[in-house]
Image: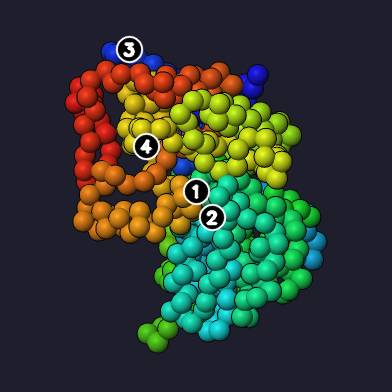
Amino acid sequence: MSDGLATLVGDDVEVRCVDGTDRVYLGLDSGASTPALDAVATRVQDFLPWYSSVHRGAGAKSQRATVAYESARDAMLRFVGRDAGSSPGRDDIAVLCRNTTEAINIAAHRIDLRSGDTVITTVAEHHANLLPWQRLAERGVSIAYVECDERGIFTADAIAEAIETAANPRLLAVTGATNVTGWMPPLTGIIDHAHCHGVQVLVDVAQLAPHRPIRPGSGAGNADFLAWSGHKMYAPFGTGVLVGPRSTFAEGAPLLVGGGAVNLVDLDGALWTDAPEREEAGSPNVIGAVALHAAVDEFDRIGWDAIVAHEVALAAQLRSGLASIDGVRLLGPVPGDATTDGQMLAIGTFAVDGMPHPLLAARLSAEYAIGVRHGCFCAHPYLVRLLGLSAQETARYRHDIVVGDRRDIPGAVRASASIATTATDIERFLSAVAELAAGKPEPEPYVQDPATGDYALRSLM
Ligand SMILES: Cc1ncc(COP(=O)(O)O)c(C=O)c1O
């Protein structure tokens, strides 16, 4: 039986259910956002009296805030093994920004990609790792997409083939773990192959970073660029990170321009400061940085062996539990699929026969106090493939969205565990899904809002 490894702020909050009972809220939506670790909240609380401007003030508090901010930056490099001690000879920087989306947008702006170059990515990506590359078409950059099979996975060979057949391949942008199925692609071979062909690699580790160590020598640890978000790793105070080679940021203008990114400004232009500050125009989010630093310290304290063992146990329980419920269809590889053995996070994305996904999510909330996510998880191309939608069905749902009618939008429900989730939590969730899949009657009719597709109970509105 897996116990939680840490406590999160709000773990004991109760919510009122439709039967009038107050139940302890069970959050199974950590794939979207995690509550703060208690240790993170304490560190933030302790820092607040010292809060002040970073890099600009002469006062003692400003100096202390600046040290806190810069030591958080150093901690981010250590977290992915890119500090001088872990990776001698490398010269990487950590840009502190808002989140993974911003980090990848910065990378897309700064990596020297030109007309005729190709970026290779996959259909399994979150929109954050698709749209910034699609926009490069404006610069004449092409995109090659690696397809997945019906399980939602692709092989290292498929990526190798895309690299070998692309015109002027320059960058591979790939996920470290998909936010829909929780599958972790076999990155070690993929990245080695890309590097052999002179192709740089960016790995979106938004889902991976809270669940697996990232170390040079294997997996995402060998990527050139890494992007992640604090709010998915128990530091929900608005900071994300982009790590990459200093040389990428040495010349040229940053994505965001303004104060802090410059050494000198006159009416004709600016002299940019050095990286990483050049990429961080505007007042930095020191609280977010302190929080993220506290989160990675807490991972070290708990230990990665324990974090991985906890995650592996919950992944098996959640995924095989869902797959064994009559009427439930688990998306992605089925438990026991030898190709993906040990490569799945504790994420279960599924559909229940005959029940629209927004209704299922609403019932889990109103009747069981369980919070999950439903929809397409910001990964539309991937969902279309996982759900096996035909071109006609895809065209129909595109039309429905254009006319603002979301009653019938395809999708699924996702449950995702955190460092604090216990085996008992997963049992509670599985028994709720089993009851609903077995046809438990609605306590009163749920009402759907056509504009959002969401269902609610009048008595709880
Ligand atoms: C795999 C993956 N990449 C990128 C993102 C975007 O993260 P953010 O919203 O923090 O920018 C998410 C968020 O769900 C994600 O799961």
Q: Earlier in the sequence, mark 3 or mark 1?
A: 3
Q: Secondary structure at mark 2?
A: loop
Q: What's the residue at 64%, 30% (across, down)?
A: 316
Of badges 1 and 2, nearer the viewer stands 1
Closer to the camera in the image, 100 or 271: 100
Q: Earlier in the sequence, mark 4 or mark 2?
A: 2
The residue labelled by disc 3 is 21
Closer to the camera in the image, 244 or 51: 244
Left or right position of 322 against 18 = right
Q: Earlier in the sequence, mark 3 or mark 4?
A: 3
Left or right position of 282 against 263 = left
Q: How far apart are labels 4 and 1 at the CA level?
A: 15 Å
Determine crowd level at label 4: few under 14, some 14-19, many 20+ residues with C-alpha closer than 10 A: many
Q: What amino acid does circle 3 point to?
A: Thr
Q: What's the residue at 55%, 30% (across, down)?
A: 323
Left or right position of 415 against 449 = right
Which disc, if any, is residue 124? 2
Q: What amino acid does circle 2 point to?
A: Ala
Are dots 4 and 2 in contact, CB under 8 Å?
no
The answer to whether the beta carbon of the residue marked 2 is less than 8 Å from any atom of ligand 1 is: no
Could you tell me if residue 93 is visible in this image?
A: no
Q: What amino acid does circle 1 point to?
A: Leu
Determine crowd level at label 2: few under 14, some 14-19, many 20+ residues with C-alpha closer than 10 A: many
Q: What's the residue at 66%, 28% (across, down)?
A: 313
Of badges 2 and 3, nearer the viewer stands 2
Q: Earlier in the sequence, mark 2 or mark 3?
A: 3
The residue labelled by disc 1 is 386
Which disc, if any, is residue 435? none
Q: Secondary structure at mark 1?
A: helix
